[in-house]
Image (cartoon, rainbow, N blue to C red):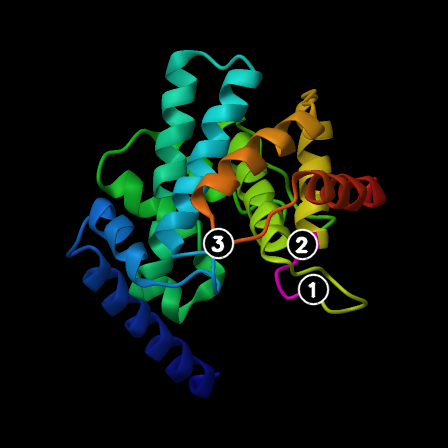
Amino acid sequence: RKGNERVLKARLDDASFFVSSDLSINCEERVKKLDRVTFAEGLGTLLDRSQRIKWIVSYLSDKLNFSEAKKRISISAAHFCKHDLVSQIVSEFPDLQGIMGGKYLLSEGYDREIALAVVEHYLPKGSSDLLPKTDSGAILALAERFEILLSIFAKGERPSGSSDPYALRRSANGILQILWSMNWSINIYELLANCIDHWKTIFPDLSINDFVLIKELSDFIRVRI
């Protein structure tokens, strides 16, 4: 017991130090730091990724007829959704991503719905995991998953056999689980078509074939059903 206590105390001391260090800067400053972290080769930084997620959130908010207030909350949550990835606490304890992002937002007085959406957008983490409960959390979770599917497929990479380094199958499963859970009806084909048009403007160096990419993504999602 004493040995375990020593180890646990050391880890809690580490965590306390990292949280104190993180609180020395604000959430907006952490968002700016995302521009220094590469997301994936050819796909820009984590800040670029956050902006793509924000674009999809705005699109989905209109399609789902969100009120202006709810749309503002969802877009604000998208803005901050990855800020804790450059925090010291998440660097040391990766399982706390999203959770600490929400807590740091609350500590600065941001709306609880924004903080909760940041926490929920990582859900579900698996087939039997909890699902987002709030509209803003669910739409942000959808946008995050659509973004990675679109970006990785546009780059030309595909899951093969047991190799799926970006967990794209899990992302597609999550999209379907969230849609069914929220009882939302979305024209996925139309969403993909609009996103691909936008992706072509921000990734001019990628040879994106609209027809092929829409078909591959549609088939990929259909297989998950």
Instruction: Give the camera-side residue of 218 and 9.
Output: 218
Marks 2/3: CA–CA distance: 23 Å
Of label 3 and label 1, which has the lower sequence position? Answer: 1
Q: Is residue 208 left or right of residue 224?
A: left
Q: Which mark is residue 79?
A: none
Q: Secondary structure at mark 1?
A: loop
Residue 18 image-quadrant placement: bottom left
Whether residue 120 appears in this view of the structure is: no
At 64% from the left and 58% from the top, the residue drawn is 156
* Residue interval drawn in magenta: 164-168
At 66% from the left and 48% from the top, the residue drawn is 171
Q: Amino acid at mark 1?
A: Asp
Q: Residue furthest left?
A: 24
Instruction: Give the camera-side residue of 220 and 183.
Output: 220
Q: Dots 2 and 1: beta carbons under 8 Å?
A: yes
In this rendering, is residue 133 above or below 118? Answer: above
Q: Secondary structure at mark 2?
A: helix
Residue 206 percent location from the top left of the image: 53, 53
Magenta highlight: main SS: loop
Residue where numbered disc 1 is placed: 164
Residue 189 percent location from the top left of the image: 70, 29
Q: Amino acid at mark 3?
A: Asp
Q: Mark 3, mark 1: which one is toward the viewer?
A: 3
Q: How many marks?
A: 3
Label 1, residues with CA under 10 Å away: few <14, some 14-19, many ≥20 = few
Residue 2 percent location from the top left of the image: 43, 85
At 42% from the left and 35% from the top, the residue drawn is 54
Whether residue 150 appears in this view of the structure is: yes
Residue where numbered disc 2 is placed: 168
Residue where numbered disc 3 is placed: 205
Q: Dots 2 and 3: beta carbons under 8 Å?
A: no
